Amino acid sequence: MIRLVVVGSVAYDAIETPYGTRDRALGGSASYFSYAASFFTKVGLVGIVGKDFDNHLLDPHVARGIDLTGLVRDEKRDSFFWRGRYEGDMNSAQTLEVRLNVLGDFKPQLPASYRSAPFLFLANSHPASQASALSQMKGKVFSCADSMNLWISNELGALRELLRRVDGFFCNDGEARMLSGNANLIYSGRRIMELGPRFITMKKGEHGAILFSHDGLVGIPGFPVEKVVDPTGAGDSFAGGFMGSLARSGKSDLPALKDALVDGTAMASFAVEGFGLERFYTLTEKDIEERRSRIIEYMPGAR
Amino acid sequence: MIRLVVVGSVAYDAIETPYGTRDRALGGSASYFSYAASFFTKVGLVGIVGKDFDNHLLDPHVARGIDLTGLVRDEKRDSFFWRGRYEGDMNSAQTLEVRLNVLGDFKPQLPASYRSAPFLFLANSHPASQASALSQMKGKVFSCADSMNLWISNELGALRELLRRVDGFFCNDGEARMLSGNANLIYSGRRIMELGPRFITMKKGEHGAILFSHDGLVGIPGFPVEKVVDPTGAGDSFAGGFMGSLARSGKSDLPALKDALVDGTAMASFAVEGFGLERFYTLTEKDIEERRSRIIEYMPGAR
């Protein structure tokens, strides 16, 4: 039984970082999210690939039990392609090239077997497309959405409509400032809460994350990683750990959200240790449990 | 008996923030540090003011029992003056004007009654001047120093010499990157540790701080403050709470350093809630204890 559905992208990424390059690595929000979440719960993926896609790239996903019934293949066009570069503090990518290809007019269709899952994650996409996926779910679903600066600028109406319908919203610090029109992150988070979500997870790259909820705020520092090999997918891996954690516990109260922050931080910290999803492929549940402990010991409260 | 000596500046500050302005507020590293530390321990201040200085500005310091024997007055020149402005995320000041005045050739002299204090904080100043103050201490002293980009650029030799002698070093993220020549903060902190200190406290403004020590790393998020009225002195207030906490416990092991991070975070969070030292003047020990609890509850580890 699928507990967590992710609707997002499966892509080819070309990546440059100070530690090397990859020309055609598996990328995309749903690839990272589903793999990270698979350590916590049963995940179903909704996405699209093109005629150029090598299906064997998803063998590790299949091996982790991720359901790919919702992944469609378009034999007329190529897969979504992204090329980016990281420099300096590596907190944000410089996008060098985007080819939407199959993603251009993708209308996500959720398989019947996904529609009664209790948890749903809508990775970054046009907010109307996210809303359409949400509408396909049956019964009570705990839903969260991610977004990006493009939709805040160009589709604010549709995004606000979506925010009234989802339980949680994931954004980064820059997007939060854009949405609130204010530079203070605490002020920004509180204003976004007023748009409807029950909680917001504001991601701050190396500086960790802040969770806003009606029951209180929670802050978690970023886990210290001396060698950030490739930050691509860190945010989606964070969300995968976070949502996987909630789906496993079946809870979304403040203690569950705190736990989810630790799990999200753990998965993001692994994601950046290798190019693309490479670090994930050697990851064990013991590694994750150890990282969780180290994250908790890293904070002064653990005395 | 004085437990903690601070050598630093006492200044007039002119401040502009989105919440208002102050023309001649009490400022300076030693003013903030000593007041913050006075909630934890007995503090002695070493500094200099000029002929224009209104001594009554330090009445609140006297009321908190801060020893001002080490504060000298130069009747020929004016006090150190700084004018700055904060905008946007308010994480760093734009310096509009600096008049060194009395601070230009100040050679700190520690009163005999200060010289056997067990804890010493050398606020930002020329590293040779900091070293001279350190040399005046008798017996075993636990010493920490702050610095700034100017000395990293122009007096790196003297700064490295100082780093070999002090127990702890306070820097901000930008200074850490300058010192290491690398953008990764974890890498940077570890390289600075190799220069000699037993620990480093890396301050990151609203993003909190990272402590590097031979016993491990500790990260603390910034306390969420929705209305940052004036960030001036936040770093010195952090250091005052941190060092005051160590001086009170008389310890400097990892649990004591973790405690000190919480106390430093608390004092910095109060400092930014008002212009200059204004918020401090109404602060009670109960306020500090409550803030400490809220800081610990703010992190996921406190479950």
Image: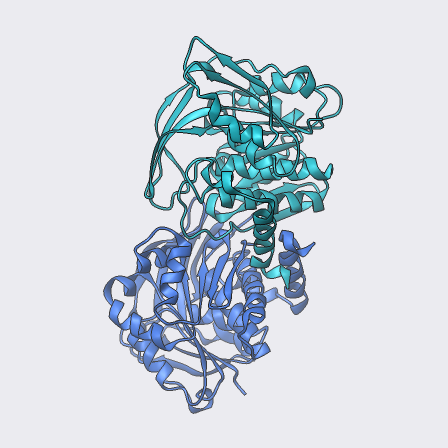
Chain colours: A cyan, B blue
Q: Position of residue B130 (x, y in %)?
A: 34, 76
For the point 58% across and 42% down, the residue is: A264
Farthest residue to the top: give it: A76
In this rendering, position of residue B121 left or right of residue A114: left
Rendered image quadrant of residue B124: bottom left
For the point 33% across and 78% down, the residue is: B131
Q: Position of residue A256 (x, y in %)?
A: 70, 43
Residue B255 in view (yes/no): yes
Residue A176 in view (yes/no): no
Q: Is residue B209 above or below residue A206?
A: below
Rendered image quadrant of residue B270: bottom right
Pick whichever, A225 or B300, lies toward us. A225
Q: Position of residue B86 (x, y in %)?
A: 42, 50
Farthest residue to the right: give it: A139
Query: Considering the image in quadrants, where does the N terminus of chain A appear?
Result: top right
Q: How many marks?
A: 0
For the point 42% across and 89% down, the residue is: B138
Q: Position of residue B277 (x, y in %)?
A: 51, 64
Farthest residue to the bottom: give it: B112
Q: Is residue B223 above or below residue B37?
A: above
Q: Is residue A1 above or below residue B132?
A: above
In this rendering, position of residue B270 left or right of residue B86: right
Query: Considering the image in quadrants, where does the C terminus of chain A appear?
Result: bottom right
Pick whichever, B62 or A244, lies toward us. A244
Pick whichever, A3 or B125, lies toward us. A3
Q: Is residue A147 above or below residue B164?
A: above
